[in-house]
Amino acid sequence: MFLNLSARLAERRDADLYRRRPLLETPQGVNVLVDGQSLLAFCNNDYLGLANHPQVIEAFVQGARQWGVGGGASHLVVGHSTPHHQLEEALAAFTGRPRALLMSSGYMANLGAVTALVGQGDTVLEDRLNHASLLDAGLLSGARFSRYLHNDAASLQSRLGKAVGDTLVVTDGVFSMDGDLAELPAICAAARQHGAWVMVDDAHGFGCLGEHGGGIVEHFGLNTEDVPVLIGTLGKAFGTAGAFVAGSEELIESLIQFARPYIYTTSQPPAVACATLRSLELLREEVWRRVHLARLIVRFREGVSAIGLELMNSPTPIQPIVVGSSARALALSAALRERGILVTAIRPPTVPRGTARLRVTLCAAHTEADVDRLLETLQLAVASLPESHD
Ligand SMILES: *Cc1c(COP(=O)(O)O)cnc(C)c1O
């Protein structure tokens, strides 16, 4: 396959798997201009509508004035500045854990945490539907790597029985393409029985779940012993950029020593940390955003059932409509777009074969009228497609 790029690209095109990047010509939000077209969008992860919030922007601008633009160095050299440190302390307090470590992205947080904790002779067990960054982290770690059936504690148990060395059980908190919650109480109990550690990547739970937006661990009332390694990302409900790992003093010190994606990269711009400090306050305090979002979720789910489309078991803003083939997902996305609505099609390998979908996401910036318009348009768009032969 080396350098046979044109053949690989053609193959991807022929399988309806070719990716194109919609060009966003306005700030992130629900009413956007994409490729010259005005659209009502239901596909970003800015669940609380903070990515373009005036107070977050102001904190970013002031942060840039005071701290400049670039991080300038890695954290261990001279790139760890006061705003990074303050944000770490605020995130530790927010998660109720002794320490938090700020990372440059969720992808890197996952690679860093898993590879620092386990290696050759150890075991990593992951949910089959985990985010790609977690699967990549498991492979990169060099540990024995296996995937248990989705959210299936019995399947996890049987793998735990065969595990060697130190064992890390890794799961999404909210599954990114399905929107369902990890069955953490059962998963944590199984792990504890076998002396394994649990790592939860709650990229989509923070800000959305729990009374204070503390995510899936707040939702289930789990502590640091249940989930020793907790990952959050800042590019979703927080509306900014970066990620964090929260846990014990020893965990964070170990990551500072051993997590290569932490050590060998430039710190994020300090002004981004200033912006996140502000968005964290909004995320905690403006409870109306979560309340409104919950109402939109109910409204959407009731409407979709009324149209006769199938929903997934999701209590979160991620509300996928599975259509099957990639061609059909693309056709439905295009039919919506013709009618002024943007929902991108999600296809393999992001999701398993035969489960291509429209990943609808709701956001606190949507109105009830926006959701109604989506529902009406969905009905028309589905009716406009040829019969499915999948
Ligand atoms: C988006 C996402 C990531 C990656 O986070 P970035 O900060 O965007 O790199 C990791 N895990 C999950 C579950 C995600 O959805």
Image (cartoon, helix red, strand yellow):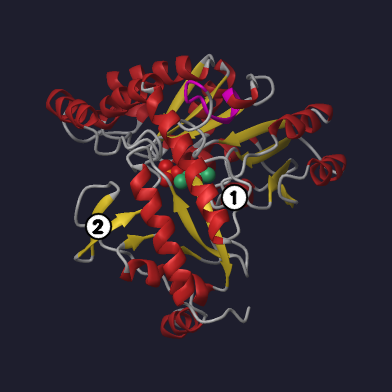
Quadrant of residue 65 within the rendered picture:
top left
Q: Residue at x 17, y 28 (%)?
A: 58
The residue carrying mark 2 has its beta carbon less than 8 Å from ligand 1 = no
Percent x, y of residue 110: 53, 41
Task: Confirm whether the magenta stretch covers residue 216.
Answer: yes
Q: Is residue 13 visible?
A: yes
278 to the left or right of 200 = left
Task: Classify 262 as above or below 150.
Answer: above
Task: Classify 23 as above or below 312.
Answer: below
Percent x, y of residue 169: 70, 38
User: Front-most of 3 and 171?
Assistant: 171
Which tag is nearer the camera, tag 1 or tag 2?
A: 2
User: Given the image, on which type of amino acid does mark 1 rest?
Assistant: Leu
User: Given the image, on which type of amino acid does mark 2 rest?
Assistant: Leu
Span colored in magenta: 211-218
- Which numbered marker is on residue 24? 2
Task: Classify 228 as above or below 297.
Answer: above
- Which numbered marker is on residue 58? none
Quadrant of residue 219 within the rendered picture:
top right
Q: Is residue 116 visible?
A: no
Question: How far separated are the C-alphas under marks 1 and 2?
Answer: 33 Å
The residue carrying mark 1 has its beta carbon less than 8 Å from ligand 1 = no
Number of dots carrying numbers: 2
Q: Please, what secondary structure does the residue beneath circle 2 have?
A: loop
Q: Residues within 10 Å of mark 1 (few under 14, many from 20)?
A: some
Task: Confirm whether the magenta stretch covers residue 169.
Answer: no
Percent x, y of residue 7: 46, 85
Q: Which residue is mark 1?
A: 140
View extreme (left): residue = 65
